[in-house]
Amino acid sequence: MAMQEELAQFERNKVWNLVSRPKNHPIIGTKWVFRNKLNENGIVVRNKARLVAKGYCQEEGIDFDETFAPVARLEAIRMLLTFACFKGFTLYQMDVKSAFLNGYIQEEVYVEQPPGFEDPSYPNHVYKPSKALYGLKQAPRAWYERLSSFLLANGFSRGRVDTTLFVKNKGQNILIVQIYVDDIVFGATNDFLCREFSKAMQGEFEMSMMGELNFFLGLQIKQSKEGIFINQSKYTKEMLKKFGMETCKPIATPMSTSINLDKDEGDFKLVLRSHT
């Protein structure tokens, strides 16, 4: 079912066309990637099947020209959380379903038919994508260009330092959008701007998840009237499980109680820095 859903996305987005196999052009293979999507509590909320192009077979200058796409730094996300806490507004997140399939590619690319879903009438034909597939080198760039063009056309201005930050001013209110590949975090000093932005995004792209920001880039986020609280308990549990320490006795201060602590004169920080 997950594989059928993925291919249905291809049909809806008009990603490719089935054509005769070209004689003098490399054909990029495809493969299926399966994974379970987890929430902040580690519970499976969705089974995903992704059709991925074998981008490692692509040759620069032949299959692609430019691949660069900016990605939000974790520091930028923390600053956004701080600003939202200071202004007292709620942050939301949205996930564009099969985001890369919305990006247009300029290069001439051919890929093999999906394994297990070959057309019985044309088994030797290949697909010619007009939009980006996951795995293609140019896919992140194509998606960023599509999304940024849409935001700029809808009255947003792009950050000069952080090009993944988009801001829209309306009177005394401000709407902030931070993008990390296909994950989008946004918030505004007026909830009307959030609803307006959500409606515009749903009209342009197919959304698979929307709601209050609670899990992003490994950070578990709790928003309340008292403030915004961040923890990484899920990550910690995963590390304990990875190294077989789930049954170990917990301790509030993970160091020997017999150590005598002296006043920090700066040397300890210097040693720590040299080791990292």
Image (tube, rainbow, N blue to C red):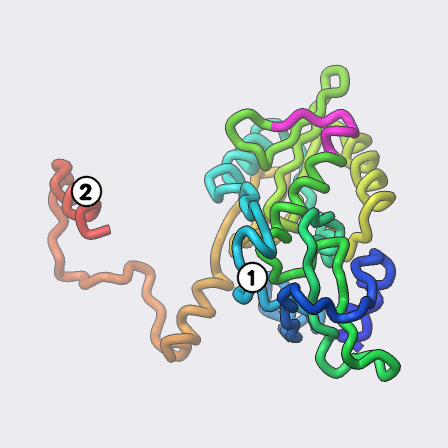
Q: Residue at x 60, y 33 (%)?
A: 165
Percent x, y of residue 171: 76, 15
Q: Is residue 45 visible?
A: no
Percent x, y of residue 228: 56, 41
Give above or below for 66 relative to 126.
above
Percent x, y of residue 94: 72, 49
Q: Residues within 10 Å of mark 1 (few under 14, many from 20)?
A: some
Q: Which residue is mark 2?
A: 269
Q: Residue at x 75, y 70 (%)?
A: 21
Region in magenta: 151-158
2 or 1: mark nearer the eye = 1
Percent x, y of residue 80: 56, 35
Give whichever of 247, 62 is nearer the camera: 62
Splitting the image into 4 quarters, where does residue 188 fall?
top right
Give whichever of 134, 251 is nearer the camera: 134
Disc 2 or 1, which lies upstream in sequence? 1
Give above or below for 233 relative to 189.
below
Q: Which residue is mark 1?
A: 58
Kind of residue at disc 1:
Gln
Is there a contact, CB below 8 Å, between mark 2 and mark 1? no
Give whichever of 33, 58 is nearer the camera: 58
- Disc 2 is placed on an element classified as helix
